[in-house]
Image: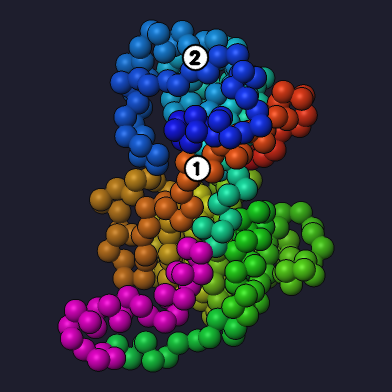
């Protein structure tokens, strides 16, 4: 990200001179790389804390900032704007809740507008793999068996299936667009009433039970907010069961893992409310070795990689907002502290 920002300065219409002072923080307390950054705020150098104390604009990961504020509450006393390098900003909200603090005066913007296509690719790849039995074919190959698994001969065309999307923002619309390209019927579950999308041919509903019962596949893209945490708890997925009028769909989760507990997810599988779970996010990450999800025959575990931040994309989002910031305009993808996203 640092290298991408530095390189972009030379070609961007916003000159470096418009930023009075640019600091690239390199501190021994920060190790690893994007997605696997390790941060020990107790080992921050005094010079780094001094730099942070005068910072007006900060580009960083939400988890790093949350840990920083937990151990050094006044570290960002002059901050006006934090640009996240992730779409999810729940670590910051969790830190505020844990510390029982009021919402900060500084503005927080998500890294957004870039994740839709890669996450859509991941979801459709997983759906196709599930329907065509790619894992079974790979297993047959290791055993030198020609069509050894009968299941690979009994697949459905995507054009005969219904996809329900929980969370219909930018990413949800990209997934819908990809699914429709394969002829899938798409239902979008939304919290507030929304007119059906004639352009994308998406049927929107505020009725969660209706959305779940109609689905052959469910994709959750829900963020972690007070209104979405545990939304699929309390046997909500029982609506998916065949005996209750559902289709026992496959659940894909690329949003946040706390929409359902691991125990309830396993229960939904064991009771055939859902036929499989393909998970890119978990209730606890990294997923502990003791988790029963690892060895469940109808669970696919993916290490939160459906939509990784590409360093080359960060400058585009940042410079667009920096221009707005210097002009006093509304920032793109700004988080509403009262809503949690």
Labelled pair 2, 1 in contact (Cβ < 8 Å): no
The quadrant of the rendering that contains the C terminus is top right
Give yes or no for residue 139 being in the magenta stretch.
yes
Residue range in magenta is 121-148
Q: Return the disc, 2 or 1, that comes first in the chain's sequence.
A: 2
Please name the residue shown 74% across and 65% down the image.
204
**Magenta stretch: dominant SS?**
helix
What is the spatial separation of the Cα atoms under label 2 and label 1, in whole angstroms?
Answer: 24 Å
Query: What numbered label is drawn on residue 312?
Result: 1
Q: In the figure, 102 relative to 151: above or below?
A: above
User: For mark 2, what is the residue?
Assistant: 52
User: Which quarter of the picture shows residue 106?
Assistant: top right
Q: How is the model colour-coded? A: rainbow
* Helix, strand or loop at mark 1: helix
37, 294: nearer the viewer: 37
Residue 287 visible in this rendered orientation of the protein? yes
Q: In the figure, 285 relative to 49: above or below?
A: below
Q: In the figure, 158 relative to 335: above or below?
A: below
233, 98: nearer the viewer: 98
């Amino acid at each position: 990200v640092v290298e991408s920002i530095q390189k972009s300065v030379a070609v961007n219409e916003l000159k470096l001179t418009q930023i009075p002072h640019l600091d690239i923080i390199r501190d021994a307390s920060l190790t690893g790389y994007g997605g696997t950054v390790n941060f020990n705020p107790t080992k921050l150098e005094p010079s780094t804390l001094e730099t942070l104390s005068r910072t007006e604009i900060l580009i960083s990961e939400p988890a790093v900032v949350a840990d920083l504020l937990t151990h050094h509450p006044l570290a960002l006393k002059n901050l006006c704007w934090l640009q996240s390098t992730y779409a999810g900003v729940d670590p910051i909200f969790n830190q505020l809740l844990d510390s029982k603090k009021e919402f900060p005066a500084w503005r927080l913007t998500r890294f957004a507008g870039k994740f839709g296509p890669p996450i859509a690719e991941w979801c459709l790849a997983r759906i196709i793999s599930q329907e065509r039995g790619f894992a079974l074919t790979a297993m047959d190959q290791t055993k030198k068996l020609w069509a050894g698994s009968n299941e690979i001969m009994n697949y459905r065309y995507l054009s005969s299936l219904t996809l329900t999307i929980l969370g219909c923002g930018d990413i949800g619309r990209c997934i819908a667009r990809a699914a429709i390209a394969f002829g899938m019927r798409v239902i979008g579950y939304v919290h507030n009433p929304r007119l059906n999308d004639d352009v994308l041919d998406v049927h929107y509903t505020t009725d969660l039970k209706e959305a779940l019962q109609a689905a052959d596949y469910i994709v959750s893209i829900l963020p972690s907010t007070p209104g979405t945490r545990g939304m699929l708890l309390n046997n909500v997925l029982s609506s998916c069961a065949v005996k209750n009028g559902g289709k026992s769909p496959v659940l894909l989760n690329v949003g946040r893992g706390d929409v359902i507990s691991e125990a309830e997810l396993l229960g939904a599988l064991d009771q055939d409310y859902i036929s499989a779970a393909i998970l890119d996010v978990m209730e606890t990450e990294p997923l502990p070795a003791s988790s029963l999800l690892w060895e469940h025959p109808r669970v696919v575990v993916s290490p939160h990689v459906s939509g990784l931040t590409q360093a080359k994309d960060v400058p585009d989002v940042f410079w667009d907002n920096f221009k707005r910031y210097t002009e006093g305009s509304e920032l793109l993808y700004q988080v509403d502290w009262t809503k949690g996203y």
